Image (spheres, rainbow, N blue to C red):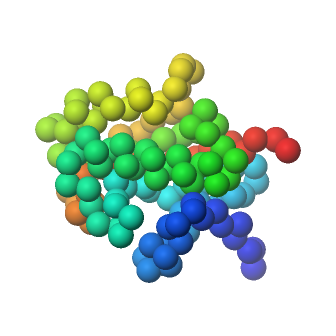
Amino acid sequence: MTIRDVIFPAGRQALYDRNRYSPAIRADGFLFVSGQVGSREDGSPEPDLETQVRRAFDNLNAILKAADCTFDDVVDVTVFMVDPAATFERVWKIVPEYWGEAPHPTLTAVGVTWLYGFQFEIKVIAKLPAN
């Protein structure tokens, strides 16, 4: 059995323990990050969409930092949006604040009907820096 090399961002382990998943796993030179949402410290959804998206990116960046990565190390992105026809433009105005310069990572955007009370979720795969 393989032992998972789990990455926990500071101050959020209880949230992941309660929900029974790992925020990120290091494997074979990559970091696989679970979907991050715009949750407040207690795990509840941020009600404002733009603030929720920023919190999701901030939560993602905390995990990347805990693994000694930045968003520049991200090679693949998957985003999930509830009602993308109504929210995509609002969400995509915020993305450049976090995305960085070209070349950008690959992207898959998926419209969904439910995200546990959230409107936006982002998951990524990052290449770990060489030691």
Extreme residue in the top direction = 102
Which quadrant, please, contains the N terminus? Answer: bottom right
Q: Is residue 114 left or right of residue 74?
A: left
Residue at (50, 67) in percent of width and height:
12
Residue at (44, 80) in percent of width and height:
18
Q: Quadrant of residue 115?
A: bottom left
Q: Quadrant of residue 51?
A: top left
Image x and y of residue 71, in percent: 57, 37
Image x and y of residue 72, in percent: 61, 33
* 32, above or below 105, in the image: below
* 1, above or below 4, in the image: below
Extreme residue in the right direction = 131
Q: Quadrant of residue 95?
A: top left
* 35, above or below 17, in the image: above
Image x and y of residue 62, in percent: 54, 51
Q: Return the residue nearer the eye: 17 or 80.
A: 17
Q: Return the residue nearer the eye: 110 or 63.
A: 63
Residue at (65, 66) in percent of width and height:
6
Q: Is residue 119 left or right of residue 30?
A: left
Residue at (48, 72) in percent of width and height:
16
